[in-house]
Amino acid sequence: MKTRINNTEYTFGEHLPETAVDLIRNQCNLVGTKQVCGSGVCGACTVLVDGTPMVSCLLPAHHLEGKDVQTIEAFSGENLHPVQRALMAHDGLQCGYCTPGFAIEGIAFYERWRVEHGTERPSREEVAEALAGHLCRCGAYAGIYDAMQAACAGEFDGEDYTPQRVDALEKVTGQAQYTTDIRLEGQLVGKVLRSPHPHARILSIDLSEADKMEGVEATAALPHRNLVVRYVGQPFAAVAAVDEATAQAALNAIKVAYEILPHVIGIDAALAEDAPDIWGKQRRDAVSAAEGATLPGYWDKNLRTSRVNMGGLLPGKAHKVVADMRKQGKSVYSQSYYNGFQVHTALEPHCAVALWDETDHVTVYVSTQAISALKYYIAEYFDIPDEQVTVIAQHIGGGFGAKLALFPEVIAAIGLSRRCNKPVSVVPSRPEEMSIGGMRPGGRFEITIAMDDDFKLEALIARAYSDSGVAISNVTAMMGAIGYSGGARDLQDHDVVNNHAPGQPFRGPGGPGALWSLEQSIDQIAHDHQLDPIALRRKWTDAENLRKLYDWVEASEAWINRPQTASSTERFRRGIGVAFGHWVHYYDTEVVIRLNTSENGLRVTTATQDIGNGVRTTLARKTAEVFGISPTSVQVDVGHTDYPHGPTAGGSRTTASVVAPTQRAATLMRERLFGLVAEALDLENAQFDEQGIRHSGGLLSWLDAMKQVPPQEVEIKRGPDPQLMQYVGSFLMGRMGLDLMFGQGRSHAAVIAEVEVDTLLGKTRVMRVWHQMDAGRIHVPDMARSATYGGIIQGIGFALYEEKILDVPHGQPLTTNLQDYRIPSIGDTPEMTVGFQDSEFEHVKGGGIGLSELCTLPVAAAVANAVFNATGIRCVESPIKPERLIDALNAKG
């Protein structure tokens, strides 16, 4: 078969792969085209075929015969397209994994639009319709809208543009390298064998037939004497072969004997008297669904109760207060709320490429949020010295909390490579990723609130029964300790284990579910007693920065002009809701920033990873600001464990951990350069200047100054803040001596949401969102705003669309693709206004703390409160699916 791809003639043999995306990625090595969903839903694999955009995961490879194909690599260098320039300038990207598909579709839309409409600006609706077949899990839709409208209007027809991110060009041209793009010499395909049963004992595993197969290089299995699998998809064996087909055939050849055990799915079934004991005597093997170490707890069969009650040492006092209040006829509110499972759905799955060489050194390319930590996890698991492990993650296609640990794909890739001393790639399919790649735990949240005659908070009781499958250590009820003040409290977390895949920490672990309950409860109390919701919150609040957010809400025209609850009788009803969120301050004391000079300029290194949070840009900008130069003049190297220790991308700690040492390193380097250069060149009247060294002979720029002296190096460790409220501890990295610190102070957020509810079809659409945060100094406002847009989008998904569904009789996940599991698309994106309080946290190095989790926490609750305002329906269960809302409306009559 002959075809033309990016102006190059290709001739392929008769044995073609099944799909065009396989041909393009694996035989042409054009890896900018991404394989994600495999079902034509996400658009990441879009290419132009004779000028028409097509999803190459559904396009048979042989259909490319005689065609002219353009992938994203065709649009680079001098061929950079206005759409790509606009995407960079308007920050229409985050992690960048979906960006090539958006860019290709956008280019096709631009070309059609310019022929038909010239430089007329398309509407949001027209852009949404054109890009309807594309998904961005990071939620970069606001920038994509702006970019497409500006490009079509001719604003980027010239060469003048300023990218917001220093790595934007790599991402819009498909040059950014992700783990799924790694191609090493002799690389094998690894595949994992997973349990088809929700609960079974493995009696034997026979690998002999697989080992005999031609093309199979290695096989491996967990020790399987009485090995118990506890969920569908649990891995226990793996193979490595020369290609995908051979690897799959080898998996099929493995013979496994199972003893089927009884299983349970769901909280009620797991707590029933006749339920099987899921963990039994192996409870110490239960993994944590939270970020960090497993909190201590005690078991009662499948019910695990945390020993950490953030209500204080006397939680029983809250129950006494409630009982007394009820006897006195005072205000006591009780309600149970329910949350479904929200799947992380990163477009790049949990994947790894490992090479264990003859010297017993292992190099692992991996999609991770924690390269520094992962290095030590790997060394400990495989019982090798730390220095024999190298972890590399140049770009990561989304994480959201699910890629913090040593996951099975990494273990499989390393274990297989160890057996054959060849590189092995393990990349799960989309159904595998959707089944076992992580989810935000669901569950039941029982809340009781008691108030005095003035509606001041007297007692808060929260009982969270979290369903994390076989995982434990959820922290949903604990969130009741953050934010509001006063009253006795009992905040008790329970885990209910049952037979499905373990939950993982997901952007603000425990937060959205807790606030779904708490913020709706406050809204309902205010409604029941004809109180203003903000005035009620003021009675519960001591924090001055939170009170300022109340002022912001009360001054908002949207809030001032909100309709009376359920006042409309029309089919389409508008409503306004408000909710507040709160988060803590985490940072890594051990972060080290290394700054080097050379004739080529400045280079910043640290062993962190950019998962779309813009840390490369933050490091470049903070360095460039000190020297008065462009961020593009600063080389930033991250994603490699040979660099000094860097922070994990979790807990909203990255920016709070790197900014202060980066600024200090740059300042010290500037001072050193000034002294060295002034002395070396014998400059008269040398003085500091923002742009360089001013002297009698003129101005020597800092970049020119670096060329006058030998290369210099400065390393700065972050260290603790001057004031600390509490020491949290080793955070699963005790053997590394790394201390994650729990800083003083809290960040807060306010969200106002406007919705439109179709009372005939039960569909809810978020029209507008106003979002205001107080997190101290905002170091890089456009990166913070981008993160907030994404947090809003994911919060809307939690509120309205996303729910993992399980087949109870068989334990099988049913929502294993991006059709059955719906994440928000560009057409679901509301108009968003994001702002930040003008404040500075003086007790924090750098003056500001993280906000990537804070920004998403109150969004779902604000949407639910808006639905109540529109309809009078209190939606206690998330997501607010049309059928649930219709049932509630019908019940209301």
Image: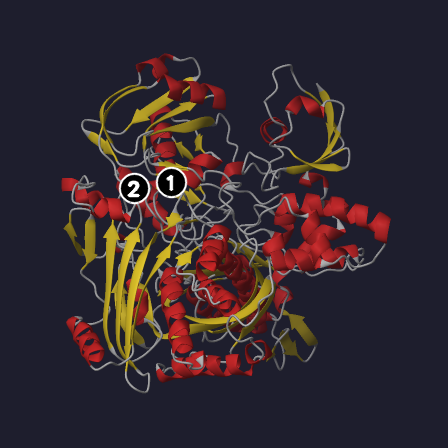
Number of marks in the image?
2
The residue drawn where x is 63% and y is 61% is 164
Q: Is mark 2 on a helix, strand or loop?
A: loop
- Whether tag 2 and tag 1 are in contact, CB under 8 A, the answer is yes
Mark positioned earlier in the residue sequence (2 or 1): 2
Which label was assigned to residue 265? 2
Q: Which of 119 and 411 is in front in this view?
A: 119
Which label was assigned to residue 806? 1
Kindly give the residue lying farthest to the front in the view shown.
Answer: 893
Q: Distance between the residues labelled 2 and 1?
A: 8 Å
Q: What element carries label 1?
A: strand
Q: Quadrant of residue 532?
A: bottom left
Instruction: Report the quarter where the N terminus lies.
Output: top right
Can residue 835 be seen by looking at this rendering?
yes
Residue 221: x %, y % from top left: 29, 26
In the figure, is residue 609 to the left or right of 57? left
* Rendered position, 576 above or below 246: below
Other residues around mark 1 within 10 Å, as few (<14) / some (14–19) / many (≥20): some
Q: Quadrant of residue 235?
A: top left
Kind of residue at disc 1:
Leu
In the figure, is residue 892 to the left or right of 120? left
Residue 301: x %, y % from top left: 16, 46
Q: Which of 70 and 686 is in front in this view?
A: 70
Q: Quadrant of residue 406?
A: top left
Residue 804: x %, y % from top left: 42, 45
Residue 387: x %, y % from top left: 33, 44
The residue drawn where x is 77% and y is 49% is 110
* Rendered position, 699 above or below 435: below
Kind of residue at disc 2:
Ile
